[in-house]
Image (tube, helix red, strand yellow):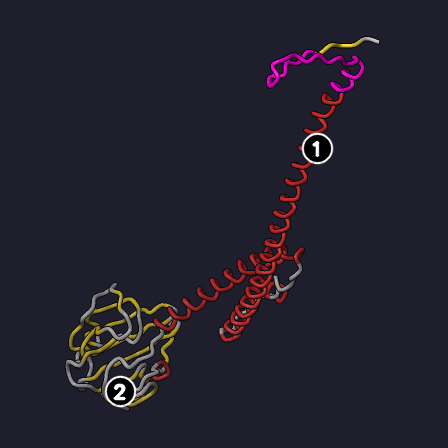
Amino acid sequence: MSYINIILFEKKLSRFVNLTVRKAVLYIIIAFFVLLIPLTLFLIMTNTQNVVAKNRVRTLTKENQALKNEITIVKSQIDTLNQQLRQLAELDAQIRIAANLELLPRDLRTLGYGGSRENEVAASVDNMIERARLQEKSFKELKKYLDQQQALLQHTPSIWPVSGYLSSSFGYRKSPITGKNEFHNGIDIVAPAGTPIRASAAGRIRFAGFKAGWGRYVEIDHGYGFITCYAHCQSIKVSTGQKVSRGEIIATVGRTGSATGNHLHYGVKVSGAWVNPLNYILSDFASR
């Protein structure tokens, strides 16, 4: 059996020490250390990975809990938004009923009401977005309708054109000029000369000038089929084509044309037919 001599120097004793070791034993020792190193490294890496994995699990657990908390908050917000959408739908329906407009279909009015489970959150949000879009479209339609109604009101004759005394009504009467029974297509309002005459609604001056029998005469086209006329004026304050607003001074009371005294002849025409102006006066602006 072969041996290997190993000479070691002992510093403290200042001498050499001779060791004799069998080759087989030496090889076993070397093999042990050769195997021990990677095993140690493996154990270190495994332990490190376990620590990293545990830390990752802790992190994911915290993130998962945070996500659960956020989902709970989102579900609460969705419930709140659903409630607000319900209230908007009810308001929309009330306005449409008051305006005599057709209601939205029920399936559209109730779209987006369901779902509080986690797997329904995304679908519920999508439904609410669609419902909000439909609600916005509905409110735009309502606004357009209300704007049209407001414009109609602004252009509908509704006030006394002058403050004075009603001396002659609409309909057949005995003419103060000819003495014959004639149709009176307006009303006469007696007032002092120079009293301001105001437009009874917004519109555009259709005619402003002298007209046979009517003297100084103003005619306003209000749109929507409404036309008003103001006759026997002393002076005219507007010109043809000019836009005027309700209550704006357009002339003054006089007795031009075929008139027996200072007064305003006021007429209202709807869709080409003369109508009683008193049906289109809402305020108590003049004496009767």
Which percent across, then down, holds residue 180?
28, 88
Boundaries of the magenta span: 7-31
Q: Residue at 31% across / 73% down in the picture?
A: 201
Q: Mark 1 points at which residue?
A: 43
The residue carrying pointer 1 sits among few (fewer than 14), some (14 to 19) or many (20 or more) residues within 10 Å by Cα, namely few
Q: Residue at 65% across / 63% down in the picture?
A: 114
- Above or below: residue 15 compared with residue 265: above
Which percent across, then down, holds residue 99?
49, 73
Residue 186 found in image quarter? bottom left
Q: Which of marks 1 and 2 is nearer the N terminus?
A: 1
The residue carrying pointer 2 sits among few (fewer than 14), some (14 to 19) or many (20 or more) residues within 10 Å by Cα, namely some
Q: In which quarter of the image is the C terminus?
A: bottom left
What amino acid is found at the position of numbered circle 1 in the picture?
Answer: Leu
Label of residue 166 in the image = none
Q: What element carries label 2?
A: loop
Label of residue 286 in the image = 2
Residue that sits furthest to the top in the current view? 2
